[in-house]
Image: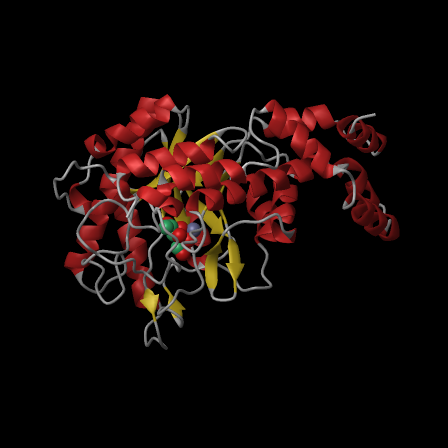
Amino acid sequence: MNVFDHAKQKYEQAGVDVEQAMGVLADVPISIHCWQGDDVAGFEGFGEALSGGIQATGNYPGKARSPEELMADFEEAARLIPGRKRINLHASYAITKGEKVDRDALSPEHFKDWVEFARKNRLGIDFNPTFFSHRMVKDGCTLSSPDAGVREFWIRHGKACRRIAAWIAEQLGSPVLNNLWIPDGCKDIPADRRGPRERLKRSLDAIYAEKYPGVIDSVESKVFGIGVEAYTVGSSEFYIAYAATHPGVYPLLDNGHYHPTEMVSDKIPALLLFFDKLPLHVTRGVRWDSDHVVIFEDEIREIAKEIVRNDALDRVLIGLDFFDASINRIAAWVIGCRSMQKALLYALLQPNGRLKKLQDEAGYTGLMTLHEELKTYPFGAVWEAYCERENVPADKWFAEVERYERDVLSKRT
Ligand code: RNT
Ligand code: ZN
């Protein structure tokens, strides 16, 4: 008997339909962030350094320097990733063909090439206004700034991005998640925690005043950033309460944005009771950094399990968010995305009904036993078969990345 047949038999004995799990997985889109390809640099060419309390560390050679290079690199990664894919863009990746266009003047035409790229590669698109790496970030603040001129500039940017997102949705006939994250906060103890939040609330109301049917709006909270350690205006409570009181706006959970023992997997079922959609930034927090490459670890599996056992694969919008400049950037994309997909497959291969019944009947010894035994089930054989069916390499994809590095990346100087 080959390894896949053996694995199938083993899972079937546990009450799991392996074929069905593979079929479901093939239909789950993962939104892959464009910014892993160039260390969150973008194409504006104003010479601004990355700011806002986020950092891409490392200087691995070969990062993309133009739209053409970023698109080629993304296609290379996409060839090694099974299943459905979307591309997640930031406003700073506008393609302006040499023209200097400020953030508040961006319009759909600057994303025409991306729409064509998405069509050619059968991708959906998601979008993000860019509230960092810009001279109008004043004293670390944007939408919550005490300076009305600064707030107005960023409100115009926020509105411009929603118009762009609406246009993209219309072009592709697929809704666009438009996620807002701002870096606003203080390095040290603030004297006023309420004022900035009041101003942020008013700015958001202005940005979201218009309704756009194809746009799913979300607000992303954070606990701290580098240089913004003491106070974050857009905190978790602030945005969950804002979203709960503004239909059409959703709270986006980035699992790098909480205290180390606070788990996003636990927040997912809680919020699914109140929101019909729940967007995620899947990442990996390591000490102070919220953006390490996603790997197949416990919390990723737990997040995937919550999505699967709440029957929410069509309500949770899975996006990735990490940036590592110390390793091959294409490999980073491939590892991160495949790890998320592995976690989903792992979750789909759990006998979730049986496990739940054990909990409900207080069969905790049996529950722990089954949880632990399932960990050494032949999961790898199912993942391999899935990759083969999707026409991507099962485990030996790195040789192709090395070839691309030799032929393409190493020539970028
Ligand atoms: C920052 C947030 C945000 C960014 C991207 C580039 O802490 O996670 O999502 O990483 O928008
Ligand atoms: Zn994020």
Residue 212 pos. (x, y %): 31, 32
Residue 46 pos. (x, y %): 17, 52
Residue 322 pos. (x, y %): 45, 50
Task: Identify whether 113 is placed above or below 334.
Answer: above
41 on left or right of 280: left
Tell which of 91 and 389 is nearer to you. 389
Task: Identify whether 93 is placed above or below 109.
Answer: below
The image's colouring method is secondary structure
User: On the rendered image, what quadrant is the N terminus found in?
Assistant: top right
Tell which of 380 and 138 is nearer to you. 380
Task: Identify whether 81 is placed above or below 129.
Answer: above
Tell which of 408 and 329 is nearer to you. 408
Which quadrant would residue 345 be assigned to in this image? Answer: top right
Q: Can residue 55 be seen here?
A: yes
Q: Can residue 248 be seen here?
A: no
Task: Identify whether 316 is placed above or below 241.
Answer: above
Instruction: Name the residue at the left extreme.
Output: 99
Residue 367 pos. (x, y %): 83, 48
Q: Residue at x 38, y 67 (%)?
A: 226
Q: Residue at x 65, y 48 (%)?
A: 302
